[in-house]
Image (cartoon, helix red, strand yellow):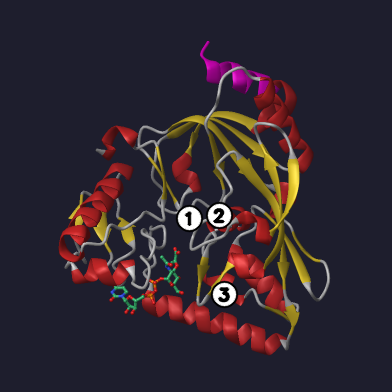
Amino acid sequence: MNSLDRLAGNLQEQLGDSVSRDLSISDFTTYRLGGPVAAAVRVGSESDLVTVARVLNDYPDTVPLLIIGRGSNLLVADSGFAGLGIILEGEFAEVVIESDQIVVAGAAVPLPVVARQSAAAGLTGLEFLVGIPGSIGGAVRMNAGGHGSEISTVLEQVRVMNMFDGSINNFAADNLNFSYRASRLTTDEVVIRARLRVRVDVVEKCRERIDEIVQWRRENQPGGANAGSTFKNPPGDSAGRLIDEAGLKGTRIGGAVVSEKHANFLQAEDGATARDVYELMNLIRKRVSEVSGVVLESELYTVGFDAIEK
Ligand code: EPU
């Protein structure tokens, strides 16, 4: 019996059927790629998350964790992930309009859902979230943004559990060291929910702003299997522009191809592997650095690729 078998067994004793083995991660990522997650647990409430933290805390070995949200920014290697995946659902997927100033959204709520529900209630400030395919938890961790805004600009407070010491804290946004596509939250910290600031506005105006963003995305970004922007924008420039300038649109490795519509989007076509996408990322990084001297940094969260990174 290996160490993950014991951990999964311990979790199963506490949480029963919500624990599974060899979860197919491709069902949980927008790329629809990647190998099995060795053990996974579906968690529907804060108290169940406390139970998972307690089991991890009692456990002698360090277990790598993967918090699985919308999987819209995630590329897992074809060989899979030899750790524990945590899937948030139930109360983590709830939106509560607390007042005409605060919307509370669980970590698993898709950003477009928060945007549309707030707009429908005549509350403005969150419309930009309709253009970002992730969930609240991932968005807070990486300070997701678009259309001139980022989650840090509307976040009042976030509730977070540290999975390895079981502590729960409410952090004011000012304490999270937000910067462009980054925060100080680590992979051991699970976002539980976020309090977001809104203002009252006319429903029709909120809806118009949502429609404009949806329209802009249709015109400027490709559909299909991708994970949005692959690389962060370097200061003062755009990763898409640099990849385009390096002549890489349409470049292909296996089933992974640089989008003709937006060069910072990598499409996974039928038959693509996670490795195809990863190798295409490496090729882009190399060519862009040769052409423009800029070393692009991944925005995509890549898991399990160490073996082929060099
Ligand atoms: N551009 C090109 N060629 C391309 C693509 C873009 O020359 O193939 C040029 C555009 O003409 C424009 C500039 O690059 O002048 C910037 O492009 P765009 O307006 O499409 O914005 P972006 O910087 O590429 C960012 C976010 C997107 C977000 C949009 C809209 C990053 C890394 N990306 O894209 O976020 O949707 O702004 O606000 O910050 C994501 O993070 O996954 C994402 C999709």
Q: Is residue 74 above or below residue 7?
A: below
Q: Is residue 4 magenta?
A: yes
Query: For the residue carrying disc 2, how many other residues have a C-alpha within 10 Å: few (<14), some (14-19), or many (20+)?
Result: some
Alpha carbon distance from label 1 to label 2: 18 Å
Confirm whether residue 255 shows in the render.
Answer: no
First reached walking from the N terminus: tag 3 or tag 2: 3
Residue under label 3, please give it.
Answer: 128
Amino acid type for the residue under numbered disc 1: Ser
Residue 33 numbered tag: none
Seen at 59% across and 38% down, the residue is 188
Q: Give the left or right position of residue 1, taking residue 293 as reference.
A: right
Residue position marked by numbered label 2 in the rendering:
183
Q: Earlier in the sequence, mark 3 or mark 1?
A: 1
Q: CA separation, marks 3 and 1? A: 17 Å
Residue at 83% over, 71% down: 99
Q: Which residue is mark 1?
A: 72
Q: Main secondary structure of the magenta part?
A: helix
Q: Which comes before the other along the chain, label 1 or label 2?
A: 1
**Mark 1 vs mark 2: in front:** 2
Question: Image quadrant for the C terminus?
Answer: top left
Question: CA gap, disc 3 to disc 2?
Answer: 19 Å
Q: Secondary structure at mark 3?
A: helix
At x 55% / y 54%, what residue is drawn? 183
Q: Is residue 206 above or below residue 305?
A: below
> Residue 38, percent across and down?
49, 28
Give ligand 1's quarter of the image: bottom left
Left or right: residue 269 versus residue 30 is: left
Q: Secondary structure at mark 1?
A: loop
Residue 138 among magenta residues: no
Start-end of magenta stretch = 1-12
